[in-house]
Every structure is written in C-alpha cells, then in structure tokens.
Amino acid sequence: MLLETSTLSYAHPGQRAISFPELSVDAGEALLVLGRSGSGKTTLLNLLAGLLTPLSGEVRLGGEKLSSLSGQAMDLFRGKNIGIVFQKPHLIAALNVRQNLELAHFFGKKKGQDTTQLLAELGIEGKANSSVLTLSEGEAQRVSIARALANSPKLILADEPTSSLDDENTEKVIQLLKAQAAKIGAALVIVTHDQRVKNQIPNFIEVKAA
C-alpha cells in the first residue's frame, strides 16, 4: 500500500484531540475525505503532507514514516514525493506560469515532467509565459494543479478543489485530477465538504469533530 495511516490523532493548542479514521490508498487509486467545516479534514491533509506532526500514530508513504523525517529532510521528501493543490493557488506573483512550475523542480531537486506538455494536458499551454496575476480563477487553479503534478509525485493532495466551482467545472477538475494521478501512478486524496464529488469518487471516508 502506497499511503497508510494508523491510530492518527492531533490536537491544536487549547483544543481537544481529534482522532482520524484509518486510511490506505494505493498507487493509481483515489480517496475522498469528507467533512464539514471545522471537522479536522484540513488538519488531516496537513498530517498526510508532513506539514504537521501527529499527537499519536503515524503516516507512511512508500514505506517511509513521515514522523521520522524533520526539517530539511522532510522538505526534500515532500518536494520529491507529495504534490499539494491548496484551496487558494499560492502562486509566486513575481514569476510567470512556466517559472512557477520550474520552481517545483528546483525545490524537489528532480527534473520532473515537461512543463510544456503538462500545461498542454491541462489546457493552458497558451499561458506558459503569462504573469500569474493575469490568470482567471479557473486558470490559476489549473496552474496550481500543474505545479502539484510537476515532479510526478507519489501522492497528490487536494484541499477543497471544487468549493467555488459550478457542477460542470467540478466534474472537469475531478476528472482532470483522477486522470493525471492515474497517468503518473500516484495516490490521490481529495479533502472537501463538497458532497457532489462523491459522484466522481465513490471511495470515501468521513471526518467528524468529537
């Protein structure tokens, strides 16, 4: 199994600990994590990404225990193996679209996917040399997805990728993520409160605050 968790829990300062259900996702598979606002689903995503250290339990990706890595080692492991699609794109305004993708190669210290081909597959090849400040919301989201895929990660994590989209574009974005994950053999985990996504990804767990 590519991604596995066991007895995972986390406590934000001054709050009760949240215990998370076990999850396991293999290469090429997709998992949906559903939960209302405040349920802890984004906390779970951050644990899976190695951005938070669990109170108890562990996350294993490709046999590597994330809590055994720290600092620079965790940053490098994340850059090589984990692609994150944040709810807001967080693109670097001083760089054009292509340079934002190449930055992922730099931090991951690997060549990764060909940026021109990747942008073409996402339907935004004409924006390669554009300032990210000129992109529409949908284009910026696709660039964010392209950046997450740039290093052919083992794990793709997407945080609320459809929250501001209509039904048609929700379906397009989910199909795009699934197709890209299947192409590079990555596990895909989508964290959302959007019940519509269950139509696209029947394999799901629910996170509920205690």
Image: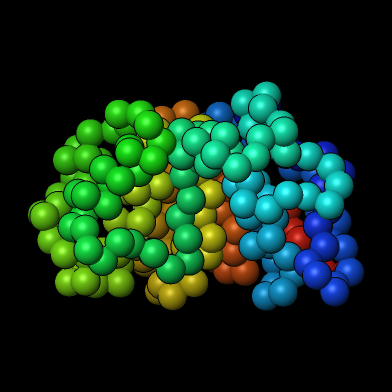
Residue 93 percent across, percent down from the top left: 26, 66
The image quarter in which residue 89 lies: bottom left
The image quarter in which residue 117 lies: top left
Residue 67 percent across, percent down from the top left: 73, 39
The residue sitting at 76% across, 61% down in the picture is 207
Residue 88 percent across, percent down from the top left: 43, 68
Q: Quick check: 69 above or below 163?
A: above
- Nearer the observer, 18 or 167: 18
Q: Is the C terminus in the top left, top right, bottom left or bottom right quadrant? A: bottom right
- Nearer the observer, 133 or 158: 133
Q: Quick check: 145 above or below 92?
A: above
- Nearer the observer, 199 or 172: 172
> Residue lying farthest front?
72
**Render colour scheme:** rainbow
Residue 202 percent across, percent down from the top left: 62, 49
Q: Is the N terminus in the top left, top right, bottom left or bottom right quadrant? A: top right
Left or right: 138 as drawn, with respect to 41: left
Q: Quick check: 10 above or below 76?
A: below
The residue sitting at 30% across, 46% down in the picture is 103
Left or right: 114 as drawn, with respect to 199: left
The reply to whether residue 195 is in sight is: no
The residue sitting at 13% across, 61% down in the picture is 130
The residue sitting at 37% across, 52% down in the picture is 145
